[in-house]
Image (cartoon, coloured by chain):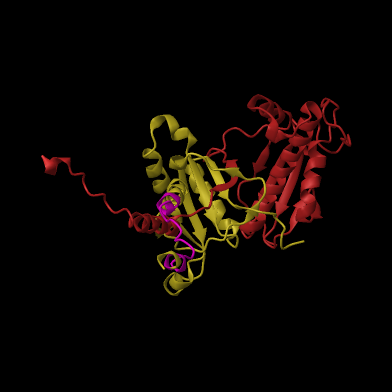
Amino acid sequence: MARNKRALPEINAGSMADIAFLLLIFFLVTTTMDVDSGINRKLPPWQPDEQTPPPPIKKKNIFTVVVNSNDQILAEDEYMDIKDLRDAAKKFLINNGDGTCDYCTGGARSPISSDNPGKAVVSLVNDRGTSYELYVAVQNELAAAYNELRDELARRTYGVGMDQLNEEQKDQMAEAFPQKISEAEPVNLGG
Amino acid sequence: MSKFKKKTGGGTPAISTASLPDIVFMLLFFFMVTTVMREVTLLVENKKPYATEVKKLEKKNLVTYIYVGKPKQALQSTMGTEPRIQLNDAFANINEIQPFVIQEREAINEAEKALMTVSIKADQSVKMGLITDIKQELRKANTLKINYSTRKGEVFGDKR
């Protein structure tokens, strides 16, 4: 009887910290904190033999960006520095040549630039010798041009930036400035 | 006498370490939750370019990675210095991309197949020729959603 009443001796928990530390160090070593992020793009489907020619687009609705193997940029037949590309693309998109875009404030309405944002297409051609770094930079600047225009429009219509809009409003902004970046089939420009 | 003796035995009492395991466990759980195990060992140099307009890649199980870059210093004696493609744990040729991507797509369940994304993790020094070839292969394999993996940062940090 006396034996049953005796409590079990308490287990020493002093080494628990050591065990936990061991596990902690293991996870510290194996962990990689980098979050995967990048620029999303959609490739055109593969068509081995072009049966139907693409619908014609007026030349003024195309903003051509050509990058050669020396990492030089030619935008609309003019030599351009990477840091001017964003503003040039914005100016092209917001041009509002035919006057149908009522939200394009500040458009130059130039007859030789895009009719409206819905028709505007950015065409990107790169050489095989272009560095990946510059290619990503160009893609980034073009995406930034669209994002800035959407953000400005969001501020005008809702008074808040893009990041505070709900999904429906975001889609609405994306529709106002549809991102149309077309990439040419690979060529060898040299240079 | 005994009264005086007690006082000499004083000093700062030992700090209780009873809550130490709790603190350590808290840290442990934090790391267990945030950790992402590195699945492949990199055989190529991978210094990703900078970009600002980045989007996070969600649903890790739908993402396939293609690494491109110069072989690492230790491997350059056998592999040379030309940029190579790495799929999983081995170097690959350009014509191995299609079967690889198709095989990866088979592993995804039917409903989510259209959402499969290929993340191109290329070194910033790689030339576009190789990237274009990879893109053409992906088009042939009908995997059209791609992602250029980048680091977050200003694009022209060193060009201004």
Observer able to see residue B79:
yes
Residue placed furthest toward the front: B1
Task: Please tell me in which quadrant of the rendered image residue B123 appears.
Answer: bottom right
Left or right of residue A34, residue A11 in this image: left
Furthest-left residue in view?
A1
Residue B26 screen position, x and y as percent: 45, 48
Where is the C terminus of chain B found, in terms of image quarters?
A: bottom right
Highlighted range, magenta: B5-24
Residue A120 visible: no
- The single residue placed furthest to the bottom in the displayed view is B77
In the figure, the shade used to draw chain A is red
Q: How many numbered badges does the structure rendering display?
A: 0
Colour yellow, chain: B
In magenta segment, residue A48:
no
In the rendered image, the quadrant that contains the N terminus of chain B is: bottom left
- Which residue appears at 67% of the width and 40% of the height? A181
Residue B96 image position (x, y, % from top left) = 41, 52
Q: Is residue B7 above or below residue A40?
A: below
| A77 lies left or right of B104 | right
Q: Is residue B16 magenta?
A: yes
